[in-house]
Image: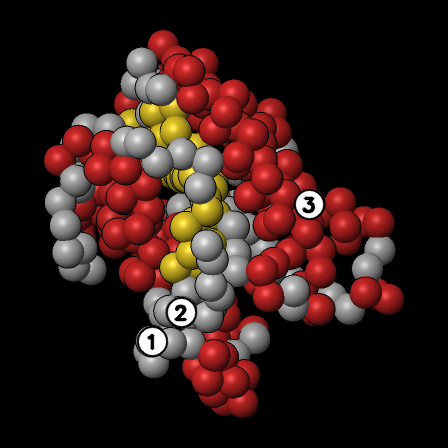
Amino acid sequence: MTVPATFHDLQNASVFITGGGSGIGAALTCGFLAQGAKVAFIDIADCAEFVAKATDQTGRTPLFIQGDVTDIAALRGAIDTAAEAHGPVTVLVNNAANDMRCDLEDVTEEFWRWMIDINLKAYYFAAQAVAPGMQAAGGGAIVNFSSVSYMMGLPELSVYTTANGGITAMTRSLARALGPDKIRVNAIAPGWVLTDKQLDKWATPEGLQGHMDQQALKEHMVADDMVAPVLFLASQASRMMTGQCMVVDGGVATTG
């Protein structure tokens, strides 16, 4: 991974990433490590192999805490463990998500609760958990992952898009609530990032071509394309930016 900029203020920053062991999250973990940050992450899977790979790649070892972000007690405990190891978390990246497809008529209450727990509830309570440490540290940055899918109104993702619309609204409110403490809260809305999961589960030649036809930039996005934008939102390079949702999708959705 080659990041086209160095964010010097992220060196030795205490960073916590949800879902930091695979896909976009793994790219973010390595990206922050390469900036010299102290990174902890929670992931439901066994990420020992990734930790070894990240250490080899960056020369720094992330702190892996295995757990389920929908278990709020476990999520809070992981954040406490990160703070004990690295100091109060001053950068939170709410990345963990699940974009399971489901038609309207097939959505059950159980599926709804599970999707909202992963894609919205965990974001809120992670922000709540890091806020006191950021306040004591004199400031911080929270970056929430939303998605352009809610802007596009994709019908097969109605529960996921509901959560992502909520993430954007939550980002605006938390920016107001935490701004007086110099805590910035922004969201990033990726387009279709072709992680291994996307390629295995959802990508078809027809779907990929149809999406490319909508993109202004004619190149499929990969996980590494999310790293520099998140580093920017986490760093003092964006110090007067808060309450915003930054689209990084190759030019599919338009804002403004």
Report the mark closest to the observer, 2 or 3.
Answer: 2
Which type of secondary structure does the marked residue at label 3 adopt?
Answer: helix
Q: Amino acid at mark 1?
A: Leu
Q: Which mark is residue 105?
A: none
245 or 46, which is in the foreground? Answer: 245
Q: Position of residue 33 (x, y in %)?
A: 22, 42
Residue 249's image quarter? bottom left
The relative height of residue 115 versus residue 186 in the rendered view (above or below) is below
- Pointer 2 with pointer 1, Cβ within 8 A: yes
Q: Position of residue 49 (x, y in %)?
A: 33, 53
Residue receiving disc 3: 116
How far apart marks 3 and 1 lie (CA) works out to 32 Å
Which type of secondary structure does the marked residue at label 1 adopt?
Answer: loop
How far apart marks 2 and 1 lie (CA) works out to 6 Å
Q: Residues within 10 Å of mark 1 (few under 14, many from 20)?
A: few
Q: Amino acid at mark 3?
A: Ile
Q: How is the image coloured?
A: secondary structure
Residue receiving disc 1: 217
Q: Residue at x 43, y 21 (%)?
A: 179
Camera sees residue 85: no
Q: Earlier in the sequence, mark 2 or mark 1?
A: 1
Q: Residue at x 42, y 76 (%)?
A: 215
The relative height of residue 220 versus residue 35 in the rendered view (above or below) is below
Q: Position of residue 5 (x, y in %)?
A: 14, 50
Q: Earlier in the sequence, mark 2 or mark 3?
A: 3
Residue receiving disc 2: 251
Residue 60's image quarter? top left
- Pointer 2 with pointer 3, Cβ within 8 A: no
Q: Residues within 10 Å of mark 2 (few under 14, many from 20)?
A: some
The relative height of residue 85 versus residue 67 in the rendered view (above or below) is above
Q: Residue at x 59, y 39 (%)?
A: 169
Q: Residue at x 20, y 60 (%)?
A: 1
